Amino acid sequence: MSEWKRVCCAVDFSEPSRLALEEAVDLCRRSGAELTIVHVRTPPPPTAVDLLASNPDPTEAEIRHAIEGNYCRCTGYQNIVIAIRAAAATLRAAGAPARAGA
């Protein structure tokens, strides 16, 4: 048995990343290792800080519109929306504005 226990493969849907994924899958099959696939995106999407810097009290609809197409939609954004709303409430309660680019 190989010393490989875990393998992480970053993919961006390019041809080189597809080939890397094929190699990672093959390695994991041969070694019995666990494979983690990470989707990377370039350039990075706008952050919640950018949203909150321009709108310190966004509605759920505004949050969903701002992050639309930028994050994984596997869960319908629900946990991301909850986290952004919580961050907005914390910043408002502390009287601290979000700073874009911080």
Image (spheres, helix red, strand yellow):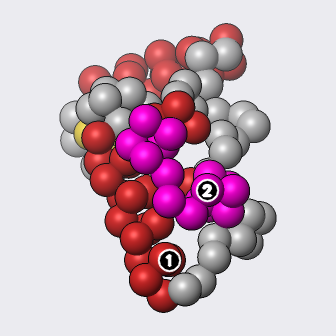
- Residue at 75 percent across and 37 percent down: it is 43
Residue type indicated by callout 1:
Leu
Vertically, is 71 above or below 101? above
Residue 91, which numbered label? 1
Q: In whole angstroms, how far apart are the C-alphas of marks 2 and 1?
A: 11 Å
Magenta residues (range): 49-63
Q: Residue furthest top?
A: 15
Quarter of the image for the N terminus: give it: top left
Q: Measured along the vertical axis of the image, is residue 51 above or below residue 92?
A: above
Q: Is residue 74 magenta?
A: no
Q: Position of residue 38 (x, y in %)?
A: 46, 37
> Residue 83, how many percent across, how many down?
36, 58
Q: Is residue 17 left or right of residue 77?
A: right
* Residue at 49% over, 51% down: 58
Closer to the chain start, of discs 2 and 1, is 2
Mark 2 residue type: Asn
Magenta span contains residue 59: yes
Could you say whether the residue bearing mark 1 is in a helix, strand or loop?
helix
Q: Is residue 83 above or below residue 30?
A: below
Is residue 92 visible in the rendered image? The answer is yes
Residue with the most extreme bottom position:
94
Please, what is the dominant secondary structure of the magenta stretch?
Answer: helix
* Residue behind mark 2: 55
Query: Quarter holding the C terminus?
Result: bottom right
Numbered badge on residue 79: none
